[in-house]
Amino acid sequence: MEHPDVIFAIGTNMTECHPVAATRLKKAITRGAKMIVVDPRETRLAKMAHLHLRIRVGSDVALLLAMANVISREGLLDDSFIKERTSGSSDFIKHVEEFTPDWAANICEIDAKLIEEAAIIYGKGDPAAIYYTLGITEHICGVDNVQSLCNLALMTGNLGVTGGGINPMRGQNNIQGAGDCGAVPSNFPGFQPCSDPDFAEKFSKAYGRSIDPQKGITKVAALNQSGQEGPDGIHAMLIDGENTVVTDPDKKHCEKALGSLQHLVVIDLFMTETAQLADIVFPATGFAETDGVQTNTERRVQRLRAAVPPPGEAKPDWWIISEISKRMGNKQFEHFHSAKDVFNELCSLSPIYNGLDWDRIENSEYQWPVPEKDHPGTPRLHEKEFKNGKGLFTIIGYRDPAEVIDEDYPVWLTTGRRLQAYHSRTQTGRSAGIDYLLNEETLEVNPKDAIEWQLKDGDFVEMSSRRGSITIKVRVTDKSPQGTVFTSFSFASVPVNILTGSGYDPVTDTAELKVCPVRIELVN
Amino acid sequence: MISPKEVPPNSRVLTMSIDDEPVDFRDGETIYDIANRCRREVPSLCYDPRLEPFGACRLCVVDVEGIKNPVASCTTKATDGMVVRTKTKTIEKYRKTLLEMVASENRNLDINQLSGYSSQELSELLDQYSTDNKRFIGKTSGKSNKDDKNPFILRDYDNCISCYRCVRVCAEQEGDHAINIINRGFQTQISTEFGNDLRDSECTFCGQCVQTCPTGALSDKKALRAKESPGEIKKTRSVCPYCGVGCAVDILTKETKVVGIQPAMDGPANEGALCIKGQYAFDFVSHPDRLKKPMIRQDDGSFRESEWEEALQLAANGFQEVADDYGRHSVYGIASGRAPHEAAYTMQKFIRSNFGTNYIDNCSRS
Ligand code: SF4
Ligand code: SF4
Ligand code: FES
């Protein structure tokens, strides 16, 4: 991370969400790297950038298309990389011809010159690294955004090189691990596709019952189908450690969905808003109480260790789930006596973990894939060739967000995280001292907007979208650009997710959490 | 991903002698680094391997043949054929005197281990040289800033020895420039811009200044709450429970209670760095709100505590009934992005092996 020559950070408020990663970028900058930050807000990261593009929320694809246009026009393509390692380049290069910086400037509401400059800096970077987070994926066009970034990296030969690549910064400690373990509707553990009959066969054998050779539905679809009559209805859920109600878009919808289930079982540390809706709640062990494994953003497989006993009768999640299964007559969980047994089974069924086992990860030195016992691990993906053969260019067009501002809802709301808070604050909110720094949520409003809307610091406003409204305190700051306001979803007392949730990415069902048109009125 | 000590990769291999032993090294390495690698214990105070060498305390001096005065090894690059001695009588005496002068500024040498990762460095050196702070009776430096109400960092300048490690870690590693040293000599103070509280400065409360302080002048106020609690301090290596960076930490416990967190200096993803969440937001685990028993909803909507067997059986029956009534595609599982692999793995196995579907997801979509 300290090796890139150019850093392109988009949709990532890294200084607040991933401070330690940001620290490493700071070091790279000290060492002479140039940084471009794309963010509507003037974040700390943006302040450190050589170039800050304050684009309109939700217009990333337009910017990235125009950058591709400039890179190609300026002859900054990596021809040999494109020839040997990619396919679909000529169609793509033709496609971007019409998307000039002038075209994008209108949509992104920034100067075309800045777009040119950013493209040239990125295109000349040797190597250039891309960093992104939820600011990129939490849109109806989340997949388009990521693929647009991929196109940029492919055309400039920035994949599989030290200090280059596309680096997603994961928000949750083990979100990577949840995917590795197959807790997704499309893949078995180790990213073995469910729709491939060979893998369905493999797991049917391993688990002693036949498993559908098709993908399952996403969580968003499952919530939509909750309580529904007919063959698609979902009537029971097991939810592990997730305050679904507070962190999901469109809170009311979510509450209703969970409320309509015949059977809801929640495993968590606290009686969260979601747990309140359950029929049965099981107490889980947490940080410092659990032996286990966790994978970070860089695919590093690390050991967690219990240091203290859990409170009361709390138990590890794997134990609780296994015990429920056993009581359903399932013999597949009987050999799980410790976290080690569970992890070793995962390793035996997942090619990317085949070379690992509980004892081998003692010192957390491996990054997957680790296919065999004596394999040293894989610090860089795609070094020689892409997992699926060649790197594919994708043809992408720009789409407006699901809802755009209009007379009734004339202001853009965008949401994010705060440094001191984490998600729904079930954890940080319960840690002594954190409230000294962050004890309430505020709405960040640009000073010029504040004058125009006749608001001052500390005023309370009612903020409404097509789905509902909330009351929130105003903080005037030039962090927010004119016409866009910002807040986080960390406080249950300010349930921003009542407002958001206007649409979903058609491919991943990721919610449009980042962009939502709102109206703001002073409360007396 | 970060190589701990960046020795210029293509530089030539040269040879020198340390305490009469020949040693290979790469052009660009400092005498201190080489000596360290050869397990020569050269004392240091202003040195932190993660920071640029600073050369302020001069405790790391060594004897270099052909040079009259002792040489600070942390800032001096080794040269081919150099002859170095790390522990001559003169050098040891020089170091002891330096130590005594440094220590004389400090009122308190008995620093609780909970103060921070490096907090024992000065007192350990004094022990090693069998001395204390009595030889030079000087005024103590600075004044404690007890008024800063922040709950995380204690600023006790009486113990400051002006090694600048805090200021340097903040500037070099955090890039925050939240603190600086003002005044000189006995008036030395670590201060924020305009002397304000840390909360009103650029400080992000990452705790790095606390963890690098070798004297306890900056210390971990939150951990020190457990100063009087009974029991030995135990350290357990684990990983921060918050974001995907995956910083390695040492969990500090006393008996059955987590009392503090220290960064793992050799953590592969963080190399000693942490942020406010990993450093200070650890005590949610011992919050009284934690669930301690299984809970079952009653007919009136309220919950009652239950024994495990009853709750497990009820949970199992419920899933079975729904599957029987509505088919196996009516049960869904949502795994956590925060619980360990074992949780996510058993969750997906629960769905796949009980119902034969792929009706499982995690919370990355929200
Ligand atoms: S806590 Fe971090 S940001 Fe604050 S003064 Fe110390 S090193 Fe700087
Ligand atoms: S200490 Fe901060 S940066 Fe490191 S893993 Fe924890 S939350 Fe992430
Ligand atoms: S450690 Fe070398 S001068 Fe302080």
Image (cartoon, rainbow, N blue to C red):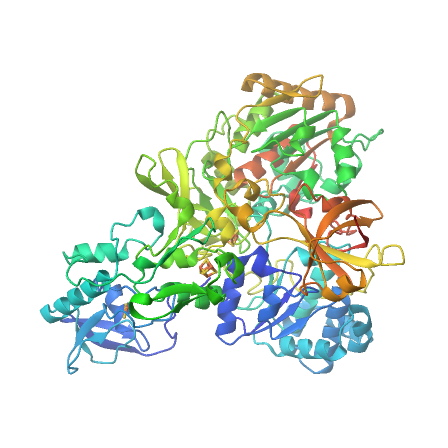
The quarter holding residue A415 reads: bottom right
B317 to the left or right of A6: right
Tell me if I can see residue A371 in this picture.
no
Query: Could you tell me residue A390's position as x and y percent?
Result: 66, 64
Q: Please state the horizontal and vertical placement of residue B227, each as a whole percent of the image.
A: 34, 41
* Nearest the eye: B162 or B351: B162
Please state the total of marks drawn on the protein image.
0
Left or right of residue A389: residue A404: right
| Vertical placement of residue A213 versus A398, above or below | above
- Outermost residue, left direction? B89
In percent of width and height, residue A457 lies at: 69, 57
Q: Position of residue A265 (x, y in %)?
A: 65, 28
Vertical placement of A178 versus A136: above or below?
above
The residue lying at 72 percent from left, 58 percent from top is A456
Q: Which sits in the foreground, B113 or A100?
A: B113
Residue A440 shows up from this direction: yes
**Can you say whether B25 is above or below A21 in the image?**
below
In the image shown, does A270 or A101 lie closer to the viewer?
A: A270
Which residue sits at x=49%, y=29%?
A336
On the rendering, which quadrant does ligand 3 occupy?
bottom left
